[in-house]
């Protein structure tokens, strides 16, 4: 049996910009992708704390150190700059793997500074 488990999370990062005229996806600072193990093109779930919207998309890379979270394409209707987001990736694991796996979680302050890296 395979379990779908939390792999990594960006907790309470703020949207820096959105662009409707784009093919779609969520842009994430390259440093945060590296820290969480999220790959470009990987599926992620995005939860908007401000308005309760939830959507599934894929990650693209924003410049390293930019502190950018960009919402692109149709999802731009679901988030505005300044909205607080939770971005989640998952992995399929055996029960044995799940028993010892520790997800990678970044916690953010109101300026998109990482305040905790678990």
Image: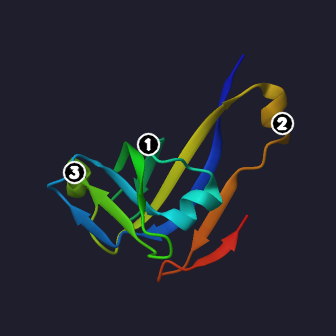
Q: Residue 92 appears at what percent x and percent y? A: 65, 29
- Helix, strand or loop at label 2? It is helix
- Helix, strand or loop at label 3? It is helix
Q: Which is closer to the viewer, label 3 or label 2?
A: 3
Do the CB atoms of the residues marked 1 and 3 lie less than 8 Å apart? no
Judge by depth and name the residue closer to the eye, 11 or 23: 23
Mark sitting on residue 62: none
- Pointer 3 local density, CA inside 10 Å: few below 14, some 14–19, many at least 20: some
Quick one: label 3 or label 2, which is nearer the N terminus? 3
Q: Which residue is mark 2?
A: 99
Mark sitting on residue 73: 3
Q: Residue at x 16, y 56 (%)?
A: 20
Q: Farthest bottom residue?
A: 111
Q: Farthest top residue?
A: 1
Q: Which residue is mark 1?
A: 41
Q: Residue 10 appears at what percent x and percent y? A: 55, 61
Q: Residue at x 69, y 21 (%)?
A: 2
Quick one: label 1 or label 3, which is nearer the N terminus? 1
Q: Residue at x 14, y 55 (%)?
A: 21
Q: Is residue 18 left or right of residue 83?
A: left
- The quadrant the N terminus occupies is top right
Q: Residue 81 appears at what percent x and percent y? A: 29, 72
Q: Farthest left residue?
A: 21
- Pointer 2 local density, CA inside 10 Å: few below 14, some 14–19, many at least 20: few
Q: CA distance from mark 3 to mark 2?
A: 37 Å
Q: Is residue 28 left or right of residue 96?
A: left
């Amino acid at each position: 049996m395979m379990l779908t488990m939390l792999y990594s999370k960006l907790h309470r990062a703020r949207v820096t910009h959105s662009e409707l005229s784009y093919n779609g996806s969520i842009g994430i600072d390259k440093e945060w992708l590296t820290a969480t193990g999220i790959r470009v093109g990987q599926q992620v779930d995005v939860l908007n704390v401000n308005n309760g919207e939830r959507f599934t998309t894929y990650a693209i890379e924003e410049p390293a150190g930019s502190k950018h979270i960009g919402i692109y394409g149709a999802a731009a209707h679901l988030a505005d700059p300044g909205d607080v987001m939770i971005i989640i990736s998952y992995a399929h694991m055996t029960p044995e793997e799940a028993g010892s796996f520790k997800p990678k979680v970044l916690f953010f302050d109101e300026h998109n500074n990482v305040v905790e890296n678990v």
